């Protein structure tokens, strides 16, 4: 039971990480549970901790199972991508300190900036632009830049931040959609108004 899989492919140790209690994680480890285990989607414990904003768990995992730092899931996401989605800016620095590149992309060529914009994580977007300004203009395999993802995420001040840094809201992807198409599709008046006048 201590290492059993549920129907979602998660073990108790995955939930211990999600719950954020280092003592529970240590208890399971002391009972013989490995910390190198992944979910059926190849998500590591570190990736789950990054997504859930579990800073102490991340610190602990980086100290005891360093080998998983550069692991990727079945979509090519590493721990930094999960941290970008989770939005806790404290987590990115330890990843970088342990030599995880913050410039890696997913299988679809998404950057951590794309992911944080899509998930409406303003503080994370601002932090990423400070530590990795060179990824501002990167596009994914469909031609989407961070402005497209900001329009999708719907947070006006993220788009304002990007435009202040010089990103184009007029850049198009393969199907010729602009940031305006996306914000209109989401019914976001404020975002649509900003994109239209940019």
Image: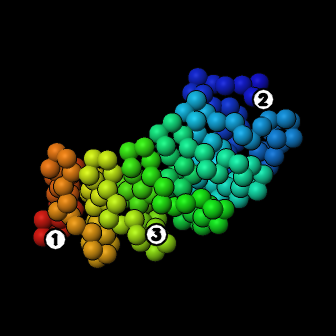
Give the vertical position of 24 relative to 56 (above or below).
Answer: above
Residue 53: image x %, image y %?
58, 55
- Distance (Cα) linking label 3 and label 2: 41 Å
Tell me the residue that label 3 is attached to. Answer: 132
Label 2: state its secondary structure.
Answer: loop
Few, some or many C-alpha atoms within 10 Å of disc 1 (few <14, some 14-19, many ≥20)? few
Find the distance from the CA under tag 3 to the CA under tag 1: 24 Å
Task: Tell us which disc is closer to us: 3 or 1.
Answer: 3
Q: Which mark is residue 198?
A: 1
Q: Quadrant of the C terminus?
A: bottom left
Q: Is residue 162 left or right of residue 78?
A: left
Please give the name of the residue rendered at 18% of the width and 55% of the height, measured from the top-left corner: 172
Q: Residue at x 49, y 72 (%)?
A: 131
Left or right? Give the position of 97 relative to 172.
Answer: right
Classify 10 Å Cα crowding around label 3: few (below 14), some (14-19), many (20 and above): some
Of the numbered discs in the image, which one, if any, rests on residue 2? 2
> Circles 1 and 2: CB distance less than 8 Å?
no
Residue 71 location (% of width, % of height): 60, 45
Whether residue 21 is visible here, answered yes or no, is: no
Residue 77 visible, this angle: yes
Q: Which mark is residue 122?
A: none
What SS does tag 3 mark?
A: loop
Q: Nearer the viewer, mark 3 or mark 2?
A: 3
């Amino acid at each position: 039971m201590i290492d059993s899989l549920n129907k979602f492919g998660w073990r108790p140790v995955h939930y211990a990480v999600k719950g954020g209690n280092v003592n529970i994680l240590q208890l399971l480890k002391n009972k013989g549970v490995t910390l190198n285990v992944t979910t059926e989607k190849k998500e590591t414990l570190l990736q789950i901790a990054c997504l859930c904003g579990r800073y102490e768990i991340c610190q602990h995992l980086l100290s005891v199972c360093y080998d998983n730092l550069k692991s990727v899931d079945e979509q090519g996401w590493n721990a930094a991508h999960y941290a970008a989605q989770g939005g806790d800016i404290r987590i990115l620095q330890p990843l970088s300190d342990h030599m995880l590149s913050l410039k890696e992309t997913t299988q679809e060529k998404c950057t951590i900036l794309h992911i944080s914009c899509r998930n409406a994580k303003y503080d994370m977007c601002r932090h990423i632009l400070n530590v990795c300004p060179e990824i501002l203009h990167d596009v994914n395999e469909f031609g989407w830049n961070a402005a497209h993802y900001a329009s999708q995420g719907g947070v006006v001040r993220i788009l304002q931040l990007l435009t202040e840094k010089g990103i184009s809201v007029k850049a198009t992807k393969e199907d010729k959609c602009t940031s305006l198409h996306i914000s209109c599709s989401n019914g976001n008046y404020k975002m649509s108004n900003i994109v239209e006048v940019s």
